[in-house]
Amino acid sequence: MLKREKKEEKKKGGLSALKGLLYGMAVHGSVTAFLRTRMYMEHLFMLMTLGDMLGFPIIPPYYSLRLLPYAVPNIKSWKTRLFRERDFTDLLTQ
Amino acid sequence: MVDVLQTPSLWVVIGLIAYGIAYFVYSKWVDEKIWEVSAERTTPAHMYLDGVEFFPVSRWVLYGFQFKSIAALGPILGPFIGLTYGWLPALIWIILGNMFIGWVQDYSSIMITVRNEGRSMGPLVYQYVGERPRTILLGYLLFYLLIISAVFIYLISVFWNVFPGTFLATLVIFISAIIIGAMIYRWQVNIYAVTTLAIVLVILAVAVGAYVPYPKKDFLDPMLGPGGTLLFWSIVLAVFLFFASIAPMPTFITPMNFISAFPAIFGVIIIILGALLTPLTGITLKHPTVASSDVLLGFTGPGPIFPILFVSIACGAISGWHSLVSTSTTGKQLDSELDARPVGAGAMLTEGLLALASLAAFMVVAPETIAALKGSKPAAFVTGATLLTSYLGGEALAAFWKSFFALFLVIYAFTVQTLVTRYWRVFSGELFTGGLSILGNKYVATVIGLIIPIIFALSGSWINLWIYFGGSNQLLAGLALFLVAIVVAKFKRPPYYALLPAIFMTIVTLFALIWETYDYIRRVSAYFAVLAATGDPSEAVKKLFARPPMTNNPPAALTVNIIFIIVGIILVVLGFLMAYYLATSYLRARGEE
């Protein structure tokens, strides 16, 4: 029983390795590119909704306040992404 | 059954064993003794996890990604120029280059990023070498991108011209990519169904290429003059690249990469299998083992074996492009330090396998056949690869496989070229600011990034352009290895495993670039000598590296040759400066011990 389970696990591991390999070759680069695109759109969204935090209100504060509860959980990671310095060699996959 | 020694199979097996030793013995030793990797040490993917640039990815996914990002036409067509010196020197360089230099650069580039908070090449140069070398690197990359683009634009145009039907096949792939892109991202169709459809569409594209062999080779030459068809295909390609570069990624580039991954992998597998099966299929070596001393010494052919062989077989043995990929993406997504070896060394050695497969395809083509193909490298590869895969259907399917391998070449070149054109655009946006900001404009930058390479591509000899490409690419690899040696020395570990290849690659590539520049200077001097003697520019232009339609306009041909001299001098000067800064930084790092 144990042997069979081990065999199945190995088979499963092999299959997931193959899946991962194909995914990496065909899709991973695209996924990374989409994530970056989403990141830039999020930058824009956060700047528009919470722009008055930085001193330039774009939409009326009423709507900013309505959106604030949804934006708060993302503020920390947004700041990390926004303020990270990017070099020209970081742009390779864009 | 034929004598195994007379087939490529034995040499492929020797290559596989050598790569096995490089992976299971040498890289393991470096991994454990030099870098002392540990699963306990947190990688930047975990440390700076943001779900966008930094996030841990499985080693299998990263291996596939790394291989697809580094594999292009270098390992496929480079061996053909290496073959000028006979197949044995080319084979030795592919095997030894991979064993001692190629994987060292890819793996170590990942490791320096992992150990330096996920920094990419630019910041690493800034941190360890200084601000000025980082600026030099930026200038160097600018020329490097133009030369890569020139080589690939020229090659794709040649493929479309030389193999009738390949353009139609490529067009089917383009349309399929747009449909597949919409199915995945807009309509969100099940991925297995989409994958099956993608494979069916690739087969359809190959069939179209095989059984609708139009437009014919040089079909526009009677109307536009010699070289007119090539110019036409270059412009068609530039239009495709322009839209691919400015359109959102999901519209074209990403589904194109998705659809092209399948034939790209399949092609390598069937060539390697074909080479291993040659004792059974009876396909024997047809190419000379070593060329004559005249060729080896450079009296005829592309130049002396040292340094030209080492830059002509570029990515198949080592490539600077890999260090950019390794530091900009892969190093930031490594789940564990233990994955650096399978991803970095594993992907590079797999690319070495691709070079080995290409060499095997060339080895079975007789020099007379190559002469009948007018020395066309892509045609020689397609002929050899079709021959090696004759075990899959024989004569009945020969046209199909010929179309498949022609499309295989286009796919490898096109997927990389779309990224290079896009990178040029983004890069220009970053670089040109202030008064020059118009050059950084999305449309202007893309047009510039296409027109200059087209002029380069249509001007001179392909081999010389390839050597410029190989030289700048390999030099970047040498510089990356120097950077690795500096980082390793700073960590107080023995740096020689990277330092010796760094010195070798830097010397050999600087020599190659000097040789090529000298070759252009020689041609331009000969042009002026003939012009002074005869007063006939149309006679003098024959001395230049120029082909139709450029030969019809001697002043333009002369200008482009002079531009190539300037490009060569700039590459050599920037290379020397970088090597100087890196060497002094290395000595400083050793002095700190």
Image: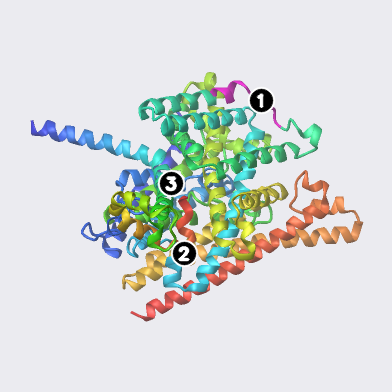
Secondary structure category for the residue under label 2: helix
Please indicate whether residue B204 sits to the left or right of residue B452 in the image. left
Residue that label 1 marks: B214
Please tell me which residue is depicted at 52% across the width and 35% down the height of the picture. Answer: B408
Query: Can you name the residue that lies furthest to the top here?
Result: B396
User: Would residue B507 be counted in the magenta stretch?
Assistant: no
Q: How far is mark 2 from mark 1, CA to CA? A: 46 Å
Mark 3 or 2, closer to the camera: 3
Above or below, B212 relative to A9:
above
Residue that label 3 marks: A33
Crowd band around label 2 with a 10 angstrom C-alpha radius: few (<14), some (14–19), many (20+): many
Secondary structure category for the residue under label 3: helix
**Residue A37: where, in percent of width, then height?**
44, 47
Q: Is residue B84 visible?
A: no
The amino acid type found where label 3 is placed reads Ala
Please tell me which residue is depicted at 52% across the width and 40% down the height of the picture. Answer: B412
**Residue B504: where, in percent of width, then height?**
49, 64
The answer to which of B50 and A23 lies nearer the viewer is B50
The answer to which of B123 and B464 lies nearer the viewer is B123
**Image label count:** 3
Crowd band around label 3 with a 10 angstrom C-alpha radius: few (<14), some (14–19), many (20+): some
| Location of residue B191 by image quarter | top left
Magenta stretch, residue numbers: B207-217
**Residue B182: where, in percent of width, then height?**
46, 31
Q: How far is mark 3 from mark 2, CA to CA? A: 20 Å
**Residue B457: where, in percent of width, then height?**
67, 48
Instruction: Give the chain letter at badge 2.
Output: B
Residue that label 2 marks: B122
The amino acid type found where label 2 is placed reads Gly
Crowd band around label 1 with a 10 angstrom C-alpha radius: few (<14), some (14–19), many (20+): some
Give the quarter of the figure containing the C terminus of chain B.
Answer: bottom left
Mark 1 or 3, closer to the camera: 3
